Amino acid sequence: MDKTTIFNLALSAMGTKNRIALPTETSVEARECALWYESVRQQVLCAAPFQEARATVRLALQAERDPDADWVTGDPDPGWQFAYAAPQDMLRPRNISTYDRFILSVSGSEKRIVTNTEDAILVYTFDQTNVDLWSVLLQNAVALALSSAICLKLGGKLDRSQLIAARANDLLMQARVMEGNIDDFQLESVPPWLSARGVDAMPSNRYFFPYGPLFVTDSVSVA
């Protein structure tokens, strides 16, 4: 599997008989696929927690809030204690290793992870460009999403583009369920009468950053 195959799957899904030999060729099909491919791939990767695009890193601290001092520019956002530099290859954060809450913020030209967790470790989605490492589900989701993006430009009908986008979204919803069930944490709820005796358990609430959006199927605009 390579980029050429992804492009040809996208062309096939929209119903055209045209195919490409190389993604860099000068055909209109190759140019349109290449124009949309990067953004479509990144949107698909952000829309579900694909394991092949999962990375973990200990975050570099940028700023720590002094609770006894007034808030100043450069501090973590009000209400938060720590601000960390977001990984440069991050497309979208997923969760902190302790599953504490956090927000994605911007300071100047840099993205930051802002949280109350000290020495935070982040799990995130990076831009996995190696098609050989993609699952079949990810390959098909990218191909269908790409097909929807180029359909109208290459002479397809609006209802066809919407149908293809819906098929891509179906795969992304499957991926959310499948990938979300990989973790096998057993989270126990402690009855109040045991909690009163000092019995503790792992917190039942785990925070995950929201997924990226699915693809629009009710309308399609062309510049």
Image (cartoon, rainbow, N blue to C red):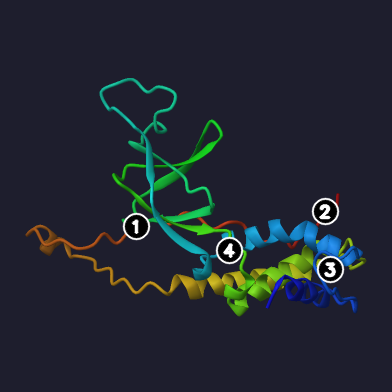
The vertical placement of 12 against 112, above or below, is: below
For marks 1 and 4, the one nearer the N-term is 1
Mark 1 packing: few (<14 Cα in 10 Å), some, or many (20+)?
A: some
Query: What amino acid is at disc 3?
Result: Asp
Relative image position of residue 217 (x, y in whole percent): 74, 63
Q: Nearer the viewer, mark 3 or mark 4?
A: 4
> Can you tell which mark lies on residue 221?
2
Q: Is the residue marked by circle 2 packed among few (<14), some (14-19), or many (20+) residues within 10 Å?
A: few
Secondary structure found at label 1 = loop
Residue position for label 3? 159
6 vs 61: above or below: below
Return the disc, 2 or 3, that comes first in the chain's sequence.
3
The residue pinned by badge 4 equals 128
Closer to the eye: label 1 or 2? 1
What element does badge 2 sit on? loop
Mark 4 residue type: Gln
> Residue 16 appears at what percent x and percent y?
89, 76
**Picture residue at 63% right of the left edge, 63% below the top:** 44
Q: CA distance from mark 3 to mark 4?
A: 31 Å
Residue drawn at the location 55% of the way across and 72% of the way down? 175
Left of 215 or right of it: where is 147?
Answer: right
Task: Specify which label sits upstream in the sequence, 1 or 2.
Answer: 1
Q: If you read the primary sequence from the N terminus, does the residue marked by circle 2 or circle 4 appear first?
A: 4
For the residues labelled 1 and 3, the Cα–Cα distance comes to 43 Å
- Mark in the foreground, 1 or 3: 1
